[in-house]
Amino acid sequence: MNKGSSYERYHRQMILPDFGTRAQKLLQESRVLVIGAGGLGCPILQYLTGAGVGCIGVVDGDQVSLSNLHRQILFTVDDIGLNKADVAVTRLRQLNPEISIESIPTTLTNQNAFDIMDRFDIIVDGTDNFATRYMINDACVLLQKTLVYGAVSRYEGQVAVFNHLLSSGERSANYRDIFPEPPKDGSVLNCADAGVLGVLPGIIGTMQAAEVIKLITGIGELLVNRLLTYQFNDHQAFTVKISKQEQTASWIPANQKAFKAMDYVWLCSSPKQSLEIDAAEFDQLTRQGNIDIVDVRELHELPIVQEFSHLRIPLATMKDAIGQLKSDTVVVFCQSGKRSLQAAQELTTLWGDAKKVYSLQGGILSWITFVQKK
């Protein structure tokens, strides 16, 4: 390793016991792919860049929005509308121009996952939806890649290292050993629905970065065959042991061809998408007086809607309050459209063709955006 600026840059970690130039060289020779440059991805990327990981890939096809800024700390208001991967890489190169950082400004799919992921040693999941998590996990199993997993919801976060090569020559447990089948769309809330404090993905993302550094350098004890759960409210953390399940292999595609044929979005989606209406259609219906409009969010959720008359019936109590719905047409909405779609499906199953039921696609936030642009 050359002295000069590189030595000064990494000096504080290189003087640690058991680290030294050996660990720093391992970091510089490693290749890490971070999927998602959002709430988890931003701190992951910053700390891996700062630590001197030699090659980092950043995958994200999304654009920066105002709602990202309270937790996605690589971005500013000037970046709104720009691709996250591109902006992140620009910032990271300013932090550490000595390493290779590649922007991959596209959405990861089962059609491009193999080509993108195969070039890296370690895969880090910074995504926020189940379809992509299962796809990444399955690809890592097929490619025999170690996966560093993280997730957040409300005041809780999780971290684990999946599919790691053990000294026995076997691979450790993977995501499907805990959750064999994906939950249906809307059954588990994401950040858009449940909310999240900006510091929580910062904490969990930093933990993921720590696991990557431990993986590369061999320092410390990995979260292999263990799932760590962290509670923000009281800073309590606990780990549970996980183990490989015999039936897990049957849920994972057998090969690359089967992987590309798998529809992960469909696996995590609820049926009857035809029940959905867009923001423009919803806006027209709000001006009609002969329908029931229902907010199925929890009573504490924001924003409070005052622009049109409606009922507030949380999804969990919908069946008990169904007597309040008197009109022949019922329109339901929530924060992002997932819970309302579930509510619409339940009402349609209950009423059949007796009433027309619709769900606002994209949730109340899509309608607010529509109205602001009118």
Image (cartoon, rainbow, N blue to C red):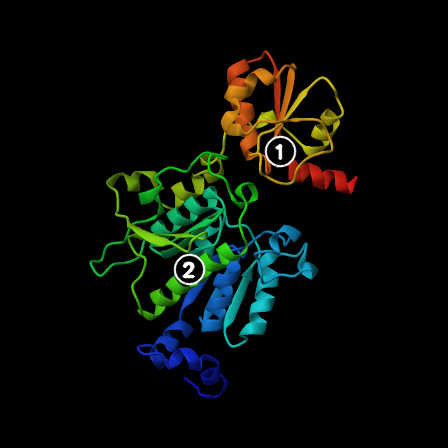
Picture quarter with the C terminus: top right
Tag 2: Cα neighbours inside 10 Å, few (<14), some, or many (≥20)? many
Question: Residue 310: x percent and y percent?
Answer: 67, 26
In the rendered image, the residue lying farthest to the left is 168
Q: Residue at x 53, y 60 (%)?
A: 42
Along the line of sight, the residue nearer the viewer: 322 or 67:
322
Q: Earlier in the sequence, mark 2 or mark 1?
A: 2
Q: Is residue 178 above or below residue 41?
A: above
Secondary structure at numbered mark 1: loop
Residue 118 visible in image: no
Which label is found at residue 361? 1
Q: Is residue 157 left or right of residue 345?
A: left
Q: Is residue 122 above or below residue 265?
A: below
In the rendered image, the residue lying farthest to the right is 374
Cα gap from disc 2 to disc 1, whole angstroms:
33 Å
Badge 1 amino acid? Gln
Q: Residue at x 65, y 61 (%)?
A: 76
Badge 2 amino acid? Gln
In the rendered image, the residue lying farthest to the top is 354
Report which quarter residue 51 is drawn in.
Answer: bottom left
Question: Residue 5: x percent and y percent?
Answer: 50, 85
Q: Is residue 147 above or below residue 277?
A: below
Secondary structure at numbered mark 2: helix
Question: Residue 359: x percent and y percent?
Answer: 61, 28
Q: Which residue is denoted by mark 2 in the rendering?
A: 208
Tag 1: Cα neighbours inside 10 Å, few (<14), some, or many (≥20)? many
Dots 2 and 1: beta carbons under 8 Å?
A: no
Question: Residue 351: x percent and y percent?
Answer: 54, 14
